[in-house]
């Protein structure tokens, strides 16, 4: 499989979703419903079925975590520093700049991309990183944004726990890892049902992502969005690559998963967080679109460099 044959179907589905929404073949309501289905059912089913699959095992070295989150820290710091030096951006906005520059679109693009590239060898490190990525990134961003607020620390932590407890992706990771630890797996009709749901995750996620891109406006916030996008699909994976391949030691598939995870475009959680705090919504939304378009080309480069193309 070449890089192009891997990339074209993935970003081709994003393009189909975008064109279908732009031409009103599917309505905005359909796109929203498809996104909700992906988050609530399809991807959680894929996560649970993959984690409980017999034979899926592996060990996560400290270097794996250090490589990925070391790259996160570098991209986040760069984004926040540039944001602070940008006229009109306050402290809260600077945090969101950094968060967007280091928050990967894992559910819609990352999971299907990495499973296509690395298969079974990449499944375990992918889902272990996904399990840590969501609570750690959201927790850090929420804490930093509210660090100068009046709410007590325990109230902020309680709010974060409630948010995670209602997140289907996080719950699926908890259930899947618990079942794996207990040696449990699905059989018969339950297995067929969960695999049927999980099998729809990739296509539906990519169509939903494309349909959602039509609501983002880029012209007004294009300069700032381009900087954030460049940090996300350029600096972030480069930092992870240097750490994973030249500083720490780990299996090649683990290092490759970390790099591709970092090479994904700006995640939708960055946009949701900007909406929640009413700060930098336009820039973050534009960064989602710009980075998704840019990742079509940059991901080919990373796949070739990693020997997967």
Image (cartoon, rainbow, N blue to C red):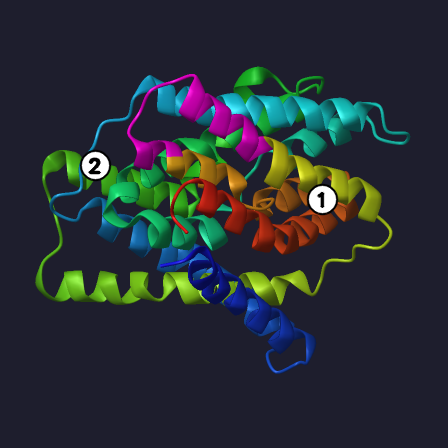
Q: Is residue 23 visible?
A: yes
Query: At 18% across and 36% down in the image, what residue appears?
Result: 57
Image coordinates of residue 30 in percent, x first then y, are 56, 73
Nearest the eye: 108 or 263: 263
Mark 1 nearby-residue class (10 Å; few <14, some 14–19, many ≥20): many
Query: At 39% across and 23% down in the image, what residue appears?
Result: 65
Specify the farthest residue to the bottom.
25
CA distance for labels 1 and 2: 35 Å
Mark 2 nearby-residue class (10 Å; few <14, some 14–19, many ≥20): some
Q: Secondary structure at mark 1?
A: helix
**Magenta stretch?**
236-255
- Residue 237 placement: quadrant: top right
- Residue 150 placement: quadrant: top right
Image coordinates of residue 91 in percent, x first then y, are 78, 23
Magenta residue check for 37: no
Question: Mark 1 or mark 2: which comes first in sequence?
Answer: 2
Nearest the eye: 76 or 236: 236
Residue where numbered disc 1 is placed = 284
Q: Is residue 101 visible?
A: no
Location of the N terminus by quadrant is bottom left
Residue where numbered disc 2 is placed = 178
Is 15 above or below relative to 55? below
Image coordinates of residue 280 in percent, x first then y, are 77, 40
Query: At 23% across and 53% down in the image, what residue appears?
Result: 49
Magenta residue check for 254: yes
């Amino acid at each position: 499989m070449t890089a192009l044959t891997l990339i074209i179907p993935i970003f081709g589905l994003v393009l189909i979703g975008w064109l279908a929404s732009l031409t009103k073949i599917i309505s905005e309501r359909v796109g929203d419903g498809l996104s909700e289905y992906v988050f609530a059912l399809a991807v959680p089913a894929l996560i649970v079925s993959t984690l409980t699959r017999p034979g899926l095992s592996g060990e996560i070295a400290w270097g794996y975590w250090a490589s990925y989150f070391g790259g996160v820290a570098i991209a986040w710091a760069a984004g926040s520093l540039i944001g602070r030096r940008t006229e009109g951006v306050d402290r809260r906005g600077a945090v969101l700049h950094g968060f967007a520059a280091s928050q990967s679109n894992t559910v819609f693009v990352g999971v299907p991309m990495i499973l296509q590239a690395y298969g079974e060898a990449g499944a375990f490190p992918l889902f272990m990183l996904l399990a840590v990525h969501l609570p750690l990134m959201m927790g850090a961003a929420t804490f930093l944004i509210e660090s100068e607020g009046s709410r007590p620390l325990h109230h902020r932590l309680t709010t974060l726990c409630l948010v995670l407890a209602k997140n289907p992706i996080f719950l699926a990771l908890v259930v899947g890892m618990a079942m794996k630890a207990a040696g449990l797996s699905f059989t018969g009709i339950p297995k067929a049902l969960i695999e049927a749901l999980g099998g729809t995750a990739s296509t539906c996620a990519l169509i939903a992502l494309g349909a959602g891109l039509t609501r983002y406006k880029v012209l007004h916030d294009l300069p700032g969005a381009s900087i954030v996008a460049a940090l996300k699909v350029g600096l972030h994976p480069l930092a992870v690559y240097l750490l994973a391949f030249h500083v720490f030691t780990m299996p090649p598939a683990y290092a490759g998963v970390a790099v591709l995870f970092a090479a994904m475009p700006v995640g939708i959680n960055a946009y949701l967080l900007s909406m929640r705090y009413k700060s930098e919504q336009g820039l973050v939304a534009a960064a989602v679109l710009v980075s998704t378009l840019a990742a079509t080309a940059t991901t080919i480069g990373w796949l070739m460099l990693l020997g997967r193309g």
